[in-house]
Image (cartoon, coloured by chain):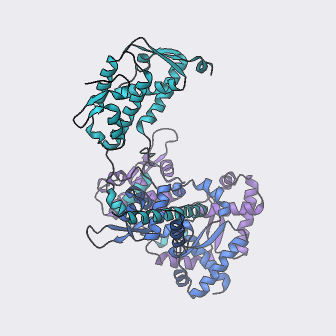
Chain colours: A blue, B cyan, C purple
């Protein structure tokens, strides 16, 4: 398959998928080696940008996702009117940060860090698809363990959890500040 | 009941948990040295009214002080009596050790900083809209069974999220009495704007419950404090006349 | 708005829409006169073709629609067939859930709940035989009322609508503290 046909196939597949597609699954679908697919996707990402396309290709949540370009956001927002992008409250963000860095984590552990019962917030984050149940802890009661969802990474535009900003320097800075 | 006429706070109360001057009781309660739930605010109020009846004159400042303290106690009591979600208890939250509590406060501060960063990323991310429409309809014939992996529970979960009413504004941090006083203030200002002079009795004629009368009275005291109204009362327990002040009338 | 920004906005709007958009509604969304929008859409159609895009813009019955390019169809077909886990799109699942629990319900009510125009999704569900017209509402315009079909119940293995899991416990769990 030549480069043009490959790009065409990749663009079409990205268009129909309603979730990020990994380079591996794309490679399988187009029957081209993964490395070539990856470099083509990277080149396409730059292309969308340089030709001022209304679309943007990003490497998010462990895969590639085609979306509208941020420059077109004002028009799309008006058109879509979705409440999906409603802002998160302070409590929501705080809880999400804890889940993101401490996952897998139980309700109780979240509450212990925040100092307040966080069941409602966790529930709302789960409803919004940002947090999900990822298992159960061994031990009494086998409490549910929470983690962030792929949608969380996608909404943040991050390729993986490893791309989250490191917490350690903040802990250091905080401890240096005051007693 | 012995009474010292030098001040309203000095009137004595006789309660199962405490006997002595009210001012001392109020301090103990506000410092949580005595459980407010063990104190009948109504009994204290009766004591105060008895004291006021004996007093030679009704001192508005003393009355205000008593009402303010009474309101604080009621608020404390309401706070204690209202059911709360089962929070982990304090010891759980602090892990039992002050050092651990301190470490956790640092950790929480770090998470709060990170949360700001997440908020920024969400903001940037919200400008990208992915396509959720799936394959165009010309491919629809390829997947005849769209319900293959759909379960009733899954549908219910999706429906619950879509149909859930928007969350109510969380008012738990608002002191209930103060919020109502604001409303009462508005009501009183509206009424007095047209009536200009009225009996307190008229201003509370539409109140169904005693708490509403109390709240209107507090609002009235607030207006008096700000010089928006003048109050006069012929005698103890006499009718209270409320008059909009000239300055206020000009506005 | 210059030509590049206009193309960007139109491409983004066509991308997120799951049904054809008339030149008139697009003109309204981008606040540019209809004639300019139409000629731009025509130019864009040619552009997709000449640059061998994986996408194609077409002027079909109901308006303009962005779709995959026929050259990429074999890959898309294969992908759709192999992608067994996501048959019903998110939009489809959400719309079906709303119809199931709110029936009888109008198109307008579904759109109001979802926050997006849902005509395309409703049509697709109707085509699939999962949703059907169950009557018309009294009142102006007498809009069509939708409900789920007997086939819907059959597919879920439910004897009747009453056997759908109750929503109340799920709704009731919502806490005052939201995310």
Q: Is residue A141 visible?
A: yes
In this view, the residue in front, B8 or A174, is: B8
Residue B221 position, x and y percent, is 47, 25
Hey, which residue is sitting farthest right in the picture?
Answer: C2
Residue A29 horizontal side relative to residue C131, left or right = right
Residue B198 position, x and y percent, is 47, 15
In the figure, C20 relative to C138: above or below? Answer: below
In this view, the residue in front, B225 or C80, is: B225
Which residue is depicted at the point 49% across and 45% down?
A: C143
Which residue is depicted at the point 67% across and 79% down?
A: A43
User: On the image, which quarter does residue C17 sit in?
Assistant: bottom right
In this view, the residue in front, A172 or A46, is: A172
Quarter of the picture holding the N terminus of chain B: top left
Q: Is residue C148 visible?
A: no
Residue A122 position, x and y percent, is 41, 60
Hey, which residue is sitting farthest top in the picture?
Answer: B234
Quarter of the picture holding the C terminus of chain B: top right
In the figure, B190 relative to B70: above or below? Answer: above
- Count the marks: how many? 0
């Amino acid at each position: 398959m030549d480069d043009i046909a490959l790009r065409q196939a990749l663009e079409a597949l990205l268009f129909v998928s309603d979730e990020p597609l990994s380079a591996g699954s794309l490679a399988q679908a187009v029957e081209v080696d993964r490395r070539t697919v990856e470099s083509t996707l990277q080149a396409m990402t730059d292309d969308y940008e340089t030709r001022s396309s209304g679309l943007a290709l990003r490497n998010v949540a462990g895969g590639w996702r085609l979306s509208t370009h941020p420059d077109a956001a004002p028009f799309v927002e008006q058109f879509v009117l979705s409440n999906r992008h409603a802002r998160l409250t302070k409590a929501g963000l705080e809880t999400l940060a804890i889940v993101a860095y401490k996952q897998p984590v139980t309700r109780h552990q979240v509450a212990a860090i925040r100092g307040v019962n966080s069941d409602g917030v966790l529930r709302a984050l789960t409803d919004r698809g940002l947090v999900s149940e990822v298992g159960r802890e061994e031990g009494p009661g086998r409490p549910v363990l929470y983690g962030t969802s792929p949608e969380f990474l996608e909404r943040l535009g991050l390729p993986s959890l490893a791309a989250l900003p490191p917490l350690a320097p903040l802990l250091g800075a905080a401890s240096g500040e005051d007693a | 009941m012995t009474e010292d006429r030098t001040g309203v706070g000095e009137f004595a109360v006789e309660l199962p948990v405490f006997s002595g001057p009210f001012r001392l009781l109020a301090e103990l309660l506000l410092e949580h040295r005595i459980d407010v739930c063990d104190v009948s605010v109504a009994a204290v109020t009766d004591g105060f009214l008895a004291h006021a009846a004996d007093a030679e004159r009704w001192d508005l400042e003393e009355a205000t002080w008593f009402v303010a303290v009474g309101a604080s106690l009621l608020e404390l009591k309401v706070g204690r009596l209202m059911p709360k979600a089962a929070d982990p208890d304090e010891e759980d939250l602090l892990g039992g050790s002050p050092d651990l509590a301190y470490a956790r406060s640092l950790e929480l501060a770090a998470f709060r900083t990170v949360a700001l960063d997440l908020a920024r990323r969400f903001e940037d991310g919200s400008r990208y809209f992915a396509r959720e429409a799936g394959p165009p309809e010309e491919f629809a014939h390829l997947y005849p069974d769209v319900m293959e992996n759909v379960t009733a529970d899954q549908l219910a979960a999706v429906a619950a999220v879509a149909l859930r009413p928007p969350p109510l504004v969380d008012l738990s941090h608002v002191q209930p009495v103060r919020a109502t006083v604001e409303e009462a203030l508005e009501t009183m200002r509206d009424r007095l704007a047209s009536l200009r002079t009225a009996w307190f009795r008229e201003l509370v004629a539409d109140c169904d419950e005693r708490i509403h009368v109390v709240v209107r009275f507090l609002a009235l005291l607030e207006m008096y404090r700000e010089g928006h109204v003048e109050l006069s009362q012929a005698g103890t327990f006499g009718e209270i006349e409320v008059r909009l002040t000239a300055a206020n009338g000009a506005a």
